[in-house]
Image: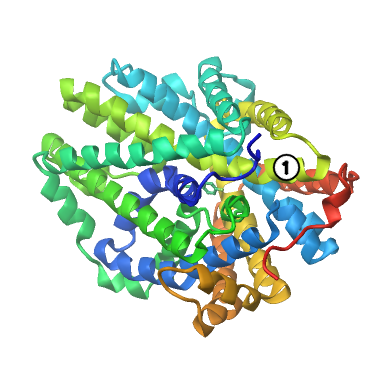
Amino acid sequence: MANENKWGSSLAFILAMIGSAVGLGNIWRYPYVLYSNGGGAFYIPYLVAIFSLAIPFLILEYGVGYNYQSSFTKALIKIKPKFEFYGWVLPVVVFIMAVYYSTIIGWDGIYLFLSFFKGWGANPNTFLNVNLLQSTDSLSGVFNFIPFVAIFMIAGWFIIWFISHKNLDDGLGKVCKVFVPVLFVIMFFIVIFSLTLPGANIGLAELFNPNWSLLWHFDIWMAAFGQIFFSLSLGMGAGFTYASYTGDDIDLISSGLYVVIANSAFENFAALGVFSILGYMSLQSGTPVSQIITQGTTLIFVVYPQVFNVLGTIGLIAGPLFFFTVYVAGITSMLSAFEVLSISIQNKFSLTRRKATLVLCLVGGFASMVYATSAGGYILGIADIFVNNIVIILSVLVECIIFAWIFKAERLIDFLNSRSKTFKLGKWWLIHVKYIIPVILIVIWVGGLYELLSIKTTESVIIIIVLALITIISSLIFTKRPAKTKDWFETEERIK
Ligand code: PFF
């Protein structure tokens, strides 16, 4: 029997990592972030974030994951048994993220279904907020359950279970090998088509019009680092976990480089498509692009359906293709987030991949039902801030310090360089992972916390406290429950 937790080839690893990186963050988040943070001028902080943070950190995560060949939690125990609690916090938080990520995948599933007959009608905004999500900006909305939304979310969890319960290479590996290239091909056609639309140039001129003065603002730098973080799934254990499944011949430095290039190419390509379409919309409706562009859910589920409505019959082809692309991008990202906690549980409680997947899909699917209520969108926004602004950055800071200082990043250099076919690590890399990245993370964290304090309402504080309690209590339970395997405290290291 093939090893249930091993990639069949380096290519499977690279495609799975690209699948993890390319997700909702690339399609709906990036175009808006680029536009609202200086347009063309944004490329300066964006490239700085890639070179100073993304590439060095990704290589560090891969290297340590490869070395331990085990879950993030088990590796931390090997580094120091005292770190076990923290070793659970990160997988639990990433799982919380996977649960709300599943909601957007569920919504996208609904739109994929509706796109075949433009079931959102003539007014997509009312359809989304009033008819479909019945949105309220208050916690009392949790008592209004919406079965139609729940069904599509459960379908998403079923797909995750179906792919994840198989041996790694037969499930996740195969899906990424087929669907990640498909994702790029469909996106390519959508973008080429968008560029031919009348008015595309209006949108592109608006997008790239550089606002150099913004470079002096702290916000645009925060936005660039935040985007790179989320978009590349940095520090969330996904890269660590996927690298731990690689074979001995893997070239981790080059793999990291390919993942970063593919992810940036995809999101910048997506931005071209989004803004060509917005330019087209602007020409049709006589409304300036600046008034049409919105972030996130509204862009995908309101502006796009409006465009497909205007496109007539072509909209019946472009619509399903677009929502299918978002769906696949979402599923391949969620699979990686799911994997982090799954492998930790498999390791500690001696569960098979099948069992761990089933249990986590049941728990995740059940927990996600809170988002299938009228308060779903509201809670999701706050959960996103809890995960991305507060916990993840802090825990990545801890992770970076543990890996770079306590594990000692220098141990990885000779091994990683000996496999690398592209570039080699030198002193510059150590300076980044030991000093520059921790400083950047502290600055981003303080900035994010400041942003959070500005949205403080009693209800949002309650939601954040509940999420913090879930994180702490479940991490404590995982830590305190005795291990079911003898080797929980004995992890072999591949790099001597
Ligand atoms: N990189 C994904 C995106 O851009 O949508 C988000 C993500 C997926 C983050 C998986 C973290 C993760 F473990």
Residue 447 picture location, percent across and down = 54, 66
Residue 112 picture location, percent across and down = 37, 24
When asked about the image quadrant of residue 436, the answer is bottom right
In the picture as drawn, the residue positioned furthest to the left comes out as 198
**Can residue 209 be seen from the camera position used here?**
yes
Residue 27 picture location, percent across and down = 36, 44
Please tell me which residue is depicted at 38% across the width and 24% down the height of the picture: 111
Q: Residues within 10 Å of mark 1 (few under 14, many from 20)?
A: few
Please tell me which residue is depicted at 13% across the width and 49% down the height of the picture: 202
Looking at the rendered image, the quarter that the N terminus falls into is: top right
Residue 101 picture location, percent across and down = 53, 38
Looking at the rendered image, the quarter that the C terminus falls into is: bottom right
Q: How is the image coloured?
A: rainbow
In the picture as drawn, the residue positioned furthest to the bottom comes out as 427
- Examine the rendered structure and indicate whether residue 167 appears above or below residue 429: above
Quick check: is the Cβ at mark 1 less than 8 Å away from ligand 1?
A: no
Q: Report the front residue among 488 and 195.
A: 488
Q: How many marks?
A: 1
- Left/right placement of residue 225 relative to residue 321 reads right
- Examine the rendered structure and indicate whether residue 182 appears above or below residue 366: below
- Examine the rendered structure and indicate whether residue 63 appears above or below residue 112: below
Q: Report the front residue among 310 and 480.
A: 480
Circle 1 residue: 466
In the picture as drawn, the residue positioned furthest to the front comes out as 1
When asked about the image quadrant of residue 186, the answer is top left
Tell me which amino acid carries mark 1.
Answer: Val
**Can residue 379 be seen from the camera position used here?**
no
- Left/right placement of residue 227 relative to residue 389 reads left
